[in-house]
Amino acid sequence: MPVVVGVVVLVVFLVVCLAGGAAAYFALRGEPAAAPSPSPVAAVSPSTPPPPPPSAAPAACLVGSWRETSYTANWEMYGNKIQFTGAGTLMQVNADGTMTTVDKVTRRGAGYGDRYEMIHNGTTKLNYVADDKTINYSSPRATGTTTLKVNGRQRAREPLKATITPETYSCKGDELRLFGEVYSSEWERIRPPGRPV
């Protein structure tokens, strides 16, 4: 009988100690002992280091020098939709959120008995912000010209303009694809001489 009483006294003592410890813990935190935590996230003690940041943003794949290998667009020309194709734009994407494109390219299309040439010649600088699938552009600064020829004859000429509507992108290693509202393009990374592929 004294053993049973001793065990009961020990259990009561442990319960009192645990309850007292919990009460002291909540008292130090300024919370009532019976109040449940309002958030399902466990509290992090000051001695626990914060989780490490992601190693690299998905947009890091964009950074580098690129050469356009394919371009396709559907533009409206004099009331008709014409598909234009081409390649050759150079693009430098910097980690600081700036980008430069150099155009010395001709986009060609044909339809309804006419042949079209859209000749871009100039440089565009702009800012960009990218997440894992979308690029948003701002502050375009373009120098150069765009010339339209129809059946070999010049029909229009105007200052080069930048398109700053958001683009969807897919980037993997040395391959990049960009998708706009009416166009898509494919790019390959330009490697410095002597660098392994």
Image (cartoon, rainbow, N blue to C red):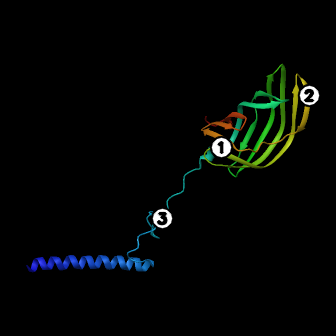
Helix, strand or loop at label 3? It is loop
Q: Is residue 191 visible?
A: no
Rendered location of residue 32, percent (x, y): 41, 78
In front of the other: 191 or 89: 89
Rendered location of residue 180, percent (x, y): 71, 38
Query: In the rendered image, which residue does mark 2 sit on?
Result: 154
Q: Within 10 angstroms of label 3, few (less than 14), some, or many (20 or more) residues?
A: few
- Mark 1: amino acid: Leu
> Is 66 placed above or below 15 here?
above
Q: Within 10 angstroms of label 1, few (less than 14), some, or many (20 or more) residues?
A: many
Q: Earlier in the sequence, mark 2 or mark 1?
A: 1
What numbered label is drawn on residue 62? Answer: 1
The residues tagged by marks 3 and 2 sit, at their Cα atoms, a distance apart of: 66 Å
Q: Which residue is outermost to the left?
A: 1
Query: In the rendered image, which residue does mark 3 sit on?
Result: 49
Decide: marks 2, 1 in contact (CB < 8 A)? no
Which residue lies at the image location 88% right of the left edge and 27% below the top edge?
A: 149
Decide: marks 3, 2 in contact (CB < 8 A)? no
> Is 38 placed above or below 10 here?
above
What numbered label is drawn on residue 81? Answer: none
- Mark 2: amino acid: Gln
